[in-house]
Amino acid sequence: MSVTRRGRVDPRALSAVVIAALIVSAIAVWGWWSSRLPAVQNRGPKQPPNHAADPKQIHQAKDDAEEARRLQLQGKHQEADAKWADVEEQVKAIGAPDELITLRQEAAANRKELKPLREKGTQSWREEEIQGRPEEIGKERILSYYRIGRTIRSGGEFLIQGRGTSSDWVFKKDAYFVVIVLGAVETKVLKNDGHEIQFQVAFKEVSRNLMASDASLELTEPDSPLLVVFWRPFEEVVLNGIPAYRVLKKVAEWANVADPRLRRTLTWLQKRLHRNGVELSPNDTIQTMSGIERLSGMRVELTYVDGLGVRTVKVLDGIKLPEEDLETLRSSSGPLLDYFIFPGAQKRVGDSWKVRPQDVANLIRLSYRYDVTGELTLERGKDEPGEPGGRAILNVVAGDVSCIGRGEDAEERVDMAVEPGSFVRYSLKQLLATEAKTRFRLKSHYHSLDHFLFRASDVRDVKIEAHYHARLEK
């Protein structure tokens, strides 16, 4: 494989431990392994040393893992959880040989996904229960921005990449890694009386992916809008259960993944790498942990009240969500992004204003399981020509963003600051944020013990960016 390296981060700017912690926090929702970071005391049991294992035991563990995947995709959550627990016990009894490292990681990731599920289809909040309310907009602007039938398709990518080492990678030496969180969402206005707006939000795909290789995997920003290269007719594939996370070691294995959504995402990732000059052959060793989030394939209905925020979340189809997921959708779904990012579309060139990250969360979506808080400062730059009505450039000149987990991710938190070069392109005619890029650096972190990169050390050459594209369909 070959790749052109660009935009290296000065390794002296960030300490290895702090950067490793950011990477850990960014995918903490995955909950893939349990061990320690240098700054965190490991409260869990020590893993037994590797030793020669009985081939029959290894074969049985692999067979049970395949059965667990089948049960999970069939929506048999309790049976799948029990089978994954059997796999974990078998690997532990065998002694966790290198051959089963990826299987142990896969079992842990899937058990964490299955653990919080319970029947919950609709939740409403009383006015006194809603804290941190958005500013009141007013009837005239609500009606002008969010006409009934307005439909927006948006795609987002949160990207972390760099170099480091980890004892849980198949590479026992220095390696390159890329973490990509992808989302494709369609938002439609169903009702609007100028005070209360009802949205239908269809999560076409939400996935989390990590790749590690001994050759560079560095990605630049997308060379074309995410909607062009990522959006697919997802409607023909319906998820009945939680798609299983998969840990793969060879590129050839990507095409054999049973879940069609996950297989499609892996194909997209391969094309994404190819466009940046990274050529993958079937025989290449590249450790991949990929999974489709439980929101994928779901439709929810959000009722937004002016000056109050989202008051009701209703699951229309798909699996039932845990209460914590519904609460996060309420507090950080940001359905009025296009208003709040550029209030009234009346700022003059050079004007600056403050924005709450939770009101524009899709621009910087790290996870749908995190609450987003903080403050962003935007400044209107010189408009760009070439679009009827004009296109405004909104520079994100400063900002602090905190991402805080809920439920099984309650111990996860990452605090970041916006870096120079962050911006939003805004269509003045459509009243729509059409494109955004946001760069980050770490301020502080806190994390629990079960993570994908918990043993990563000597981490360097790190880039952290969020990319967003949207278009008006109706």
Image (cartoon, rainbow, N blue to C red):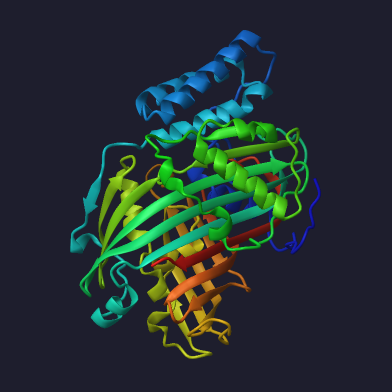
User: Residue 84 placed where, x, y %?
Assistant: 47, 24
- Number of numbered tags placed on the structure image: 0
Picture quarter containing residue 53?
Answer: top right
Instruction: Say which of 252 and 456 sits in front.
Output: 252
User: Residue 58 placed where, x, y %?
Assistant: 61, 15
Residue 131 position (above or below residue 295): below
Query: Which image quarter holds the N terminus?
Result: top right
Residue lying at 28% horizontally and 48% vertically, measured from the top left: 315
Residue 380 position (above or below residue 337): below
User: Residue 422 placed where, x, y %?
Assistant: 59, 72
Picture quarter containing residue 131?
Answer: bottom left
Residue 398 position (above or below residue 88): below
Residue lying at 45% horizontally and 72% vertically, measured from the top left: 375
Instruction: Say which of 364 and 201 sits in front.
Output: 201
| Left or right side of 401 for 267 | right
| Left or right side of 32 for 176 | right
Residue lying at 48% horizontally and 42% vertically, measured from the top left: 292
User: Residue 172 placed where, x, y %?
Assistant: 75, 34
Residue lying at 52% horizontally and 90% vertically, measured from the top left: 349
Query: Which image quarter holds the C terminus?
Result: bottom left
Is residue 136 shown to the viewer in this render? no
| Left or right side of 306 for 329 | right
Is residue 217 shown to the viewer in this render? yes
Picture quarter containing residue 442?
Answer: bottom right
